[in-house]
Amino acid sequence: MSDMISAIERTRETAASIVSSTLTNYQRKTEQEIRDCVLEEMARHGELFPRGWYDPPPGGVSILIGKERMAFDSLRKPKYWPRSDIRYSADTPTMIYVSPVDRATQMLGDFGLTIYQGSDTAIQNHIKQGLSAVLDIAECARIGMSFADLYAAGREALAQRGFEHARISTITSNAGDSNFGHTVPWSDGEAPPGELLIDQLREKIRVARRFINLDEHYVISPTCAFMVESRLFDREKPTLPNILFHVIVTFSEGRKRVLTNFEEIFKQVGMEYML
């Protein structure tokens, strides 16, 4: 197995562990307090850079609590950075995203999910169907497929479940562009840029990404990795919150894996409806 792919899978597992450790004591904490706990946990892992690559938001970590906050158009905007006046409660859906980087290989292990401990079955089913929709996109991916074709297949998969994908603006794509994720740079054999500080590496990662969108002709190779992520909403049911899940697809010499690492967290926070 490629060392780079192994590093991605390992870093993703570590990211899930960091989130799990944070969620052992998070009730009534603010967005900022939860974010700070994530960064404290990340700093305990010497194999990782102490901050994530997707910065801003500060530290490469996003915590958004509540329906209005989860309807973001860009995590980079200061209005969507973690706040000190919004607290978690069990009946409020919450999004958590972290973007760790392995020091030795510079591979990414991004991790994101929606948690909800409330009893509203409509929200529960909405979240469950949303994760299934993201996994549907990931399952469409195959060797030799272009990102443009994967994007088209993904849109069809979402439509079959009644979801739409929210347009999110990023630094390296035009405002309003729609995409379902991007490559893990240098996972397909190209040499990473060498030893850099995270602030220097961050920009290299940003510009090296290839996005899963309608115009991208990047072809999935036998060894590569890419993120599949989507902020989903149901236009027919506007009272339901937007939801986000973030998975990583790896190919190693033709062997495909879809990295979720959600199950233990679902058990931990009492989201049995997701199991």
Image (cartoon, helix red, strand yellow):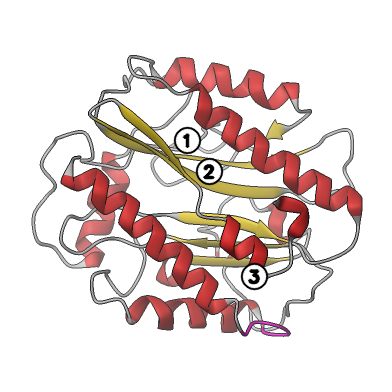
The total of numbered circles placed on residues is: 3
**Tag 1, which secondary structure?**
loop
Task: Kindly tell me whether residue 59 is visible in this rendering.
Answer: yes
Identify which amino acid the numbered label 3 is placed on.
Gln
How far, Cα to Cα, is label 1 from label 2? Answer: 6 Å
Residue highlighted by disc 1: 174
Q: Is 59 placed left or right of 199 in the picture? A: right
Indicate which disc, 3 or 2, sits on the residue closer to the N terminus. Answer: 2
Mark 3 vs mark 1: in front:
3
Indicate which disc, 3 or 1, sits on the residue closer to the N terminus. Answer: 1
For this rendering, which residue is in front, 250 or 151?
Answer: 250
Identify which amino acid the numbered label 1 is placed on.
Asn
Residue at left offset 14%, top offset 47%: 192
How far, Cα to Cα, is label 3 from label 1? Answer: 38 Å
Q: Is 39 placed left or right of 253 in the picture? A: right
Residue highlighted by disc 2: 169
Residue at left offset 28%, top offset 25%: 254
Indicate which disc, 1 or 2, sits on the residue closer to the N terminus. Answer: 2
